[in-house]
Amino acid sequence: MSGIDDLQPEDAELVESIMESHGYESLKETQRLAFEDGITEPGNHLLVAETGNGKTLCAEAVAKKRLENGKRVAYLVPSRQLVRAKKESIQEWAEDEYKVWSGPRAYQSADVVVATFDSFYRAILQNRGNARSLDLAILDDFHEIYGGFRGPEIEKAIAASMYEGIEIFALSATLGNPENLAEWMDADLTVSPEGRQIPIREQIEPVQRQDKGEAIVDLLRREQDKGPFLVFNYAKPWTQSRAEAVADTRLFADLSDRDFHNELRNKIDGEMTETLRDLARMMSRGVAFHHADLPNDVKHWIEDLYADGELGCLFATTTIAYGFDAPVQSVVVADITRGPHYVGVYEYVQWIGRAARPGYGYDEGYAFTLTDTPEETKERFFEPHRVLEDVTTHIENDVAFQWLLLELIATGWDTPHEIEAFVKEMLYWEQMEQIGAWGRQRDNRDQRLNDRLRETANWLEEYDFVIEKDTARQFEPTALGQGSVEFSFNSFVSAPLSSLRTFYDWLEETPHEDVTPLHLIDRVARQFDRTINASESDVNPELQGLLQEHDLPIDDAAITAGVIYWYWMSNFDNTQIENRAGIDPTYLPSTTRKLSDTIDATKYLMDASPDARKPDWFDTLVFKVERGVRSEEVPFVENIRGLGRYRVRQLRRYVEGSNVIGAGELEGDSLWGLLQALFERVGDSNQFEDVLKGNISGIGPSTAQGIREFVETAEVSDEYHQDDNDWEAVRPSSEPPEDDGGFSRATRLDEF
């Protein structure tokens, strides 16, 4: 293999094994330089190199060197979506020799823990699975430290690593101040002079008053030979509307003859909506849209189809701006601004870096940027003019600093000495200046840090998150403080502590009997911004009437609560939700998953309150919000693999109308009772399975077996025999029409 002979013998063997597993034939200049700089030797290291120049091979070589020396490694990536891909890449050379795991249990005994930055930080704070015993943390896509979403967790993860003496290997394509960051991390720095392997030709696409959808259509018509295209958009709705405009041109209609509608229907268990039908139609014309609220299976499917060349144009938000390796030849930046402000230069560089990645046979890539300020855009973003912004600390603001101090105190870093030592490992300390604006001389850093910590501790005490011990120089969290940290670590909600205090006060002030499922959903959606995208003009009179009847305003939070409570958790199908509530249910699964996690995490705040307690129905509510089923369906969906809201609805529809037990003979009985009656009438286990898998859409042999085993052996609590009798009953203004695809009796809201 070319270039291997130039390495030190101990490096050459391990690098060769990784290259063979990935099918690489030669070292790149960046890789050779990095190994010359001693990246496999002990100590921290920061590697900065253009996209496509082989940083990942360097990181994996560093990891393997530590593994061969009996060390344990954390390989950190920005998002859960990237965990899967990274595990697969490492597994190619780790094979059966090393345990490559992800998830909370991985910290206990895995050789390589593949995780996100935020989960790593929390694991270190809590010493989950002895996480503090890790020897090396590899920070992939380190440039995410720029952003306000993941940046704070990355900064804190690095500080935690340095505090615990865990080595760091960070790799990035875009950093404006690498020297400053290397100094912060006490790291050796390698900045590769090697240019991008495949050049990108940047081009301005002027737009004036022209609709951007039309401008993109004109661009793709003119440059059709430069596909496949990846189009970055600021807002989710724009990904769909612009994709539709391009699909209508049929520019990419000859790429595939697959039945996308049927395949998509199978991906989401038949829960099609108008939006998903539009997506399938676009895909049949070689175009798709992609954003965070699509179901994960659908997103991965679209990515795979695009990678296989069956889609010619993909419209996306920035969900795939990092780590997306596909045969993109041209990137279109449709929105170079967010509102009145330009996006970051580092973001632009990452986006266009998706074009013409190595391995796809392109001699050059293309980047087209739509803008109504051509000269200013070119000066700001294009080579050779662009200047990357400096990475700056994320805990300068009070909200972030309050959270940091509370997290430390709540996880045992509770003395002034420990807290100060941790903060001094952060970029905040590195960038704390002695000279202020216009040359003002400031107090020394130690004094200013001491004042900031004292001020923040006073705030936490005032709002009852911590107490300072009278007999020791030490802090301890209150029940509210501990509960707030547990809430944060289990919900992934980004909210100021003041919002948690407001929710806690609501729990304290609301009589227990007045905390109903409907009002809890509304309060959580309202307080923590877990809402669907809807407005008063969207909703039908039926839903408006229900909200008014329950004294709820017609706003995002109440609409979200009403749709979930009266329709989603009654297991209405998507057509019914669209017709009766008036909102698009396409992204309900994404919203309900986040909302369910957030509701579940409120139990830590309930436990903290002396005057509140977790309601008896709480755990059932959490499950129903996530899965969209009725109470009586919960045991089946919870215990039978492959049985979700669509299939359990089909199951009920069949057994209610089954001639075997007599249609209507057991009307009013629960699903449990109906299935027991059917099983008794059939009289044979094998025949019972045959009846199920032969007559019910979506239920195959394994699911039918699971239902049979559950009916034979399970004991279902009385609370599931009849549905929600103890919850308030609400009847909407009209029953669902007979031909709406619903499931007869189970669609009656008065029985919810």
Image: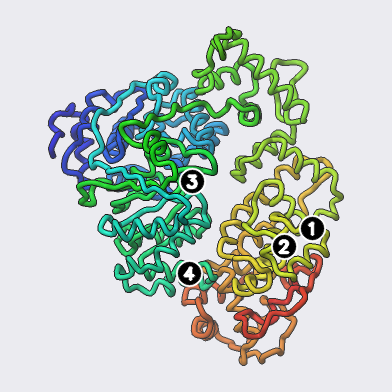
User: Which residue is pictured at 56% across the width and 14% down the height?
Assistant: 437
| Left or right, residue 297 beside residue 627 | left
How many discs mark residues in the rendered view? 4
Figure quadrant of the N terminus: top left
**Residue type marked 1:** Leu
Q: Mark 1 and mark 2 in contact (Cβ < 8 Å)?
A: yes
Compared to residue 236, the image places residue 425 above or below, namely above
Amino acid type, label 4: Asp
Q: Is residue 501 above or below residue 475?
A: below
Q: Which residue is mark 4?
A: 278
Q: Residue at x 75, y 81 (%)?
A: 668
User: Is label 4 in a helix, a strand or a loop?
Assistant: helix
Q: Residues within 10 Å of mark 3 (few under 14, many from 20)?
A: few
Q: Please, is residue 651 above or below residue 46 in the view?
A: below
Q: Nearer the viewer, mark 4 or mark 3?
A: 4
Dot 1 alpha-carbon crowd within 10 angstroms: few under 14, some 14 to 19, many 20 or more: some
Residue 562 numbered tag: 2
Give the class, few, some or many, for how many residues have Cα within 10 Å of label 4's Cα (few <14, many ≥20): some
**Amino acid type shown at disc 3:** Gly
**Helix, strand or loop for disc 3:** loop
Indicate which label's residue lies in the foreground, 2 or 4. Answer: 4
Mark 1 — residue? 552
* Residue 21, x across and y down, in percent: 23, 46
